[in-house]
Amino acid sequence: MVSESEGRGLSCRWQTFVQGPHDPRQARPRSLRVGQKPFPFLPLDPITVSPDPSRSGERDLDVDGLRAEFPILFNTTYLNSCSLGALSQRSEAYLEDFLRLWHTKGASAWYEHWLGRIEELRSRVAGFVGAMPEETALLPTTSVALSTLAQSVAARVEADGQDRYRVVCTELDFPTLAYQWAVRPEIELVVLESPDGIRVDPEQFAEAVDERTLMLATSHVFYATGYVQDIATLAEIARKVGAFSLIDGYQGAGQVPLDVHEAGVDAYTWGPLKWLCGGPGLSYLYVRKPWIEKLEPRLTSWFATRDQFDFDLRGFTYRGDARRFEVGTPALPTVHTALGGQEILDEVGLDTVIGRNAMLTQRLLDGCRDAGLDLAVPEEAHRSAIVMVRHEDPSGAVADLADRGIVVDHRPGFVRLSPHVYTTVEEVDRTVEALAGYAR
C-alpha cells in the first residue's frame, strides 16, 4: 500500500509495506543470549485465535504461540507488565528493519518508509481505543502530552472570557497528572482523597466539579491500586458544567474495555510502554473532534504546521487534525517496536486479553488469600490486572523474587503484581508460593 503526503512546494511519497518484499516480520534466523543462555528466534507467525463454543463466545488463544513471541518468558516469570510490557520478537524484527533501512537508504528512508510507518502506527493505535487517526497525536511522553493539552485548554478558556481556574484530580493519580497544574499559581488544584486508599467515588467528583472547574483530570486505572474508574460517568460530570475531561489511560489501554467515543471523554492519553508491549519513548493523545480546532498549542513544532515541507517561517498554520499537538520528530525506534506490540495485541483481540487477564487475576487473588497474604483489592466491577499485596518489606520481597527468576514490582507498603495475557497459571502459582515463602 502506498501513502502520499503533499505539502505546498514538496510532494513526498513513501512505501508502507505490511506483507511486501521487505516485511520485517519475516525475520532471518538468529540467536540472542539472555543470562548466557542462547535461544533461537522463532518464526514470526500471526497469533492464532479460534472460536471455542464451550467458552460462551470467548476465543481460544494459542498461549504457547503467543509466549514464543516474548523471549523474556523463556527463562523468567514476568508479572510486571504494568511497569514495562515484555518485548516481542516481532517488535525486534521491526526495529532491525528500521536499522537496516537506516544503513541502506539513509535519509531517503523517511519518505519511502518511515513516514508510512508512523501513519500505520497512528491508524492502529487509534482503532484500538475506538478513535479515528485524525483524532490521534503521537508525542514523546505522556508528560509532554499532558502539558501540551493543559496549556492549550487553559488558553482557549481564557480567550473565551470564561473564569475557570479549578482543576480536579485525586490523590491516587500518577503525580505527573497533578504536577502540570501544581506549578501554575493561577490554578486552584483540588486533590480528592480516597476513602479507603483504593478508590475515589464518582460522587466526590460531582461535588468538586462546578462552573469554576477548568478540567477534570484523572486516571482510567489507578497505578497503585488497580482500580478502574467509570470514565463515562466522569466525562458526563465534567460536561454538565462545561468543564474539560482529561483521562490518563496509560494503565488502562491494553487491559480494560475501552472506546473513547462511547466514553465521551474530551481527551485520553495512553502509550506503548506497559500493556501494549511497545517500549518507552512514545505516547498517544486522543482529542475529541469538536475540541481539536478550538485548541492552539503554544508548545509546537514543524510537525504541527499544515504545510510542513514549505519551511516557511512566516507561514505557520495549525494542522486541521490532532497532529497539531505533535511537538517534533517522533522516536522512530519506538514507533517500530510499538508497531510490533500493537500488531500482536490486535491479533489476539482486546476481548481475549480482558478475559484471560481476569482469569489470571482471579487465580492470583485466590492464591494470595489461601496463602494468608494481605490484599488491597477493588471490588470485582472495578478490578484490573494490577494486584497489590500489603508487605512490611516490599523492596526485599521484590529482590528475593528476582533471585528466583520472578520479576514483580513494589510501591510504598505493597508488592505490585501484574499478570498479562502471556502469563500462565503455573507462573501465577509459582509467584504466590515464592512471595508467601518470603513473607514467612
Image: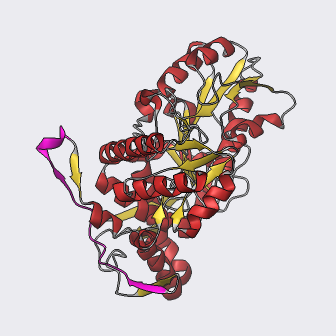
Q: Is residue 230 visible?
A: yes
Q: Is residue 54 above or below residue 379?
A: below
Q: Is residue 302 visible?
A: no
Residue sitting at the far right: 185
Magenta residue check for 44: yes
Residue located 74% across and 19% down the image: 164
Numbered label tally: 0
**Position in image of residue 186 (x %, y %):** 85, 27
**Position in image of residue 187 (x %, y %):** 81, 27
Q: Is residue 311 left or right of residue 66?
A: right
Q: Is residue 244 left or right of residue 386?
A: right
Colour logic:
secondary structure
Choose top left, top right, bottom left or bottom right for residue 291: top right
Q: Is residue 344 above or below residue 236?
A: below
**Position in image of residue 196 (x %, y %):** 63, 25
Comparing 10 with 306, the one in front is 306
Which stretch appears magenta?
37-57
Choose top left, top right, bottom left or bottom right for residue 376: top right
Comparing 402 with 241, the one in front is 402
Identify the image quadrant of the N terminus: bottom left
Comparing 321 with 253, the one in front is 253
Q: Is residue 119 left or right of residue 281?
A: left
Comparing 75 with 385, the one in front is 75
Q: Is residue 405 above or below residue 200?
A: below
Residue located 52% across and 50% down the image: 417
Q: Is residue 397 above or below residue 39?
A: above
Residue sitting at the far front: 440
Residue located 42% across and 30% down the image: 380
Residue located 42% across and 68% down the image: 73
Magenta residue check for 90: no
**Position in image of residue 275 (x %, y %):** 47, 52
